[in-house]
Image (spheres, helix red, strand yellow):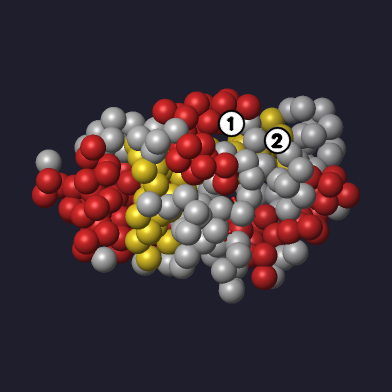
Amino acid sequence: MDRLINQAAEIILDSGLTLALTGAGISVESGIPDFRSADGLWSRFDPAEYATITAFRKDPEKVWRMLREMEQVVSKARPNKAHKGMGELEKMGVLHFIITQNVDNLHQAGGAKNVIEYHGNFSTLSCLWCGKSYLTEDKKGEYVPKCECGRILKPDVIFFGEAIPEDALERSFELAASAQALMVVGTSAVVSPANAIPSIAKQNGARIIEINKEATRLTDTVTDVFIQGMAGEVIPALVEAIKTKV
Ligand code: APR
């Protein structure tokens, strides 16, 4: 692995614009299950029944049961060594933007500032019917939070069937088109449009570094350097390798 870590460190130090695309795998070591591993969230909740905007409109109380279970875990989660290591790379000026599919706010808690949230986040709730929005904090006493208009509120996370926030989509594709290096950490790369980012970057000459506990559909197609391992171990080793070279 050392040889691969060194190769990745060289790529990052040679790059004038380095991005990261992260998925649920980077937060597993913080205690948040990912979605598609054996014991992932979708092995317990069918996404077609719990994670689409149609399902929410049809039975919001049922979806809130899954959301509350997720929130229980997310609220106790703290940034792990991978989040902190990426925050350090940003501080060192060698990682410029993190595009995350996660809604757990752990990159920000781990020190990163330039975080593009592809799938929104849990910190606010909105009413699909009257448009009013609330801070999640202000509604934490309500198991199924309600709007003053009486309807059940939805967290501002992106459900299947909803559009990615326009600014996040535009900014991420723009950056991917001019990136010279892209780190892909802890994502199965099965959900679009986030999974288009590695190929956009690759087509424009970026070198792709993939960090995952197992190979994905990217590994034999767009990945240049595949480092197989837990993000919480690989990222700190990568930070150390970069430090010894600067
Ligand atoms: N270190 C590195 N990689 C890991 C670790 C770890 N400790 N634990 C899991 N992984 C990897 C898994 O091997 C898998 O490839 O992280 C990836 C997680 O994939 P998914 O569970 O599919 O999560 P993600 O790619 O983020 O899903 C994308 O799908 O359901 C939607 O909105 C949801 O944002 C999510 C999107």
230 above or below 153? Answer: below
Residue at image point 24% right, 53% down:
7
- Camera sees residue 133: yes
Where residue 137 sits: x, y (%)?
58, 42
Can residue 115 be seen?
Answer: no
Pick whichever, 128 or 33, lies toward us. 33
Q: Quick check: is the Cβ at mark 1 less than 8 Å away from ligand 1? A: no
Q: Type of residue at label 1?
A: Leu
Q: Which quadrant of the view contains residue 148?
A: top right
Say what secondary structure mark 2 lies in: loop
Residue type at mark 2 is Ala
Is residue 237 depicted above or below 126 in this figure? Answer: below
Residue at horizontal 22 percent and vertical 46 percent from the top: 10
Residue 59 appears at what percent x and percent y? 85, 52
Image vertical order of residue 161 relative to residue 226, above or below: above
Q: Which mark is residue 169?
A: 1
Looking at the image, which residue sits at the far right?
Answer: 58
Q: Label 2 neighbourhood size at 10 Å, few (<14), some (14-19), many (20+)?
A: few
Q: Is residue 7 left or right of residue 168?
A: left
What mark, if any, has residue 163 been given in the picture?
Answer: 2
Residue 188 placement: quadrant? bottom right
From the top left corner, tell me how far across and down residue 129 is, in percent.
84, 32
For ligand 1, tell me if the residue under mark 2 lies within 8 Å: no
The answer to which of 238 and 138 lies nearer the viewer is 238
Residue 27 or residue 213, whichever sits in front: 213
Cα distance, mark 1 to mark 2?
Answer: 9 Å
Q: Quadrant of residue 96?
A: top left
Would you say the residues marked 1 and 2 are in contact, meaning their CB atoms lie under 8 Å apart? Answer: yes
Q: Counting residues from the N terminus, which is met first, the one under dot 1 or under dot 2?
A: 2
Q: Is residue 104 left or right of residue 161?
A: left
Quarter of the image where the N terminus is located: bottom left
